[in-house]
Amino acid sequence: MESLRQILPVELIGPFWMGLQILLILVVAFVLQRVVARSLHSLSERYPLPPQLMMPLRGGLRWLIMGSALLFVLERLGVSATVLWTALSGFVAVAAVAFFAIWSVLSNLLCAVLIFTVGPFRIGDVVELVDTTDKPGIKGRVIAINLLFTTLVEMPETGGALVQVPNSQFFQKSVRRWRGSDGLPVVGESTSSDN
């Protein structure tokens, strides 16, 4: 310590030690990350583990180690661990609320992709969403399918109004379907799906 005081001015000794501690934290985190990665690699060679399991596990452990190192570095710089955990938990809570708020939109987008790829019905088909077996649901001819809604025109006997049905409803309820303009069930195909 005395030799360090002779080399550096007194006001630089504190920042020097702090920089040395931060460097040591980062080096230990890097070495630990490499050891964990090599251990996982040897584990995957010894046992037949699928790469689909090892890749996210390796990435998750790497982020955990480097995130912990970042927390230690910030603590050395004077940021309180309580403040960090409060900020992190607040961020996670806001992200969870935002994800919950847009879940229905994401669900409708995914269901639109499924409608386009699987093709449970097409434009021009007559579909009926069945709430229960004894109560009729929404019935109409499909006139448009977009990323959020499927637009039906109700049958003339029920008023002929346009109805926009969220795409996710077609995967949550039973659906009766009649192909084309005749309004008759298609022979040989199931007329309801229950998801």
Image: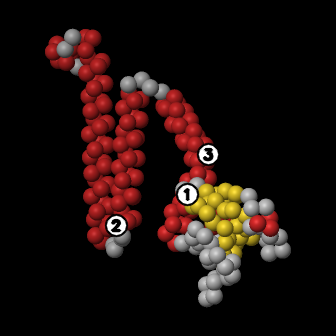
Which disc number belongs to residue 51? Answer: 2
N-terminal-most mark, 3 or 1: 3
The structure residue drawn at horizontal position 28% and vertical position 26%, both measured from the top left corner, is 19
Disc 2 vs disc 3: which is toward the camera? 3
Q: Could one spot residue 138 in this view of the protein?
A: no
- Residue under circle 1? 146
Tell me residue 8's x, y (percent).
19, 14
Disc 1 and disc 2 in contact, CB within 8 angstroms: no
- Under mark 1, the amino acid is Asn
What is the quadrant of residue 146 in the picture? bottom right
Q: Secondary structure at mark 3?
A: helix
Name the amino acid, label 3.
Ala
- Whether residue 81 sits left or right of residue 65 in the image: it is right
Other-residue count near label 1 (Cα within 10 Å), few / some / many at <14 / 14–19 / ≥20? some
Q: Residue at x 27, y 11 (%)?
A: 11
Q: Position of residue 73 (x, y in %)?
A: 36, 32
Residue underneath mark 3 = 101
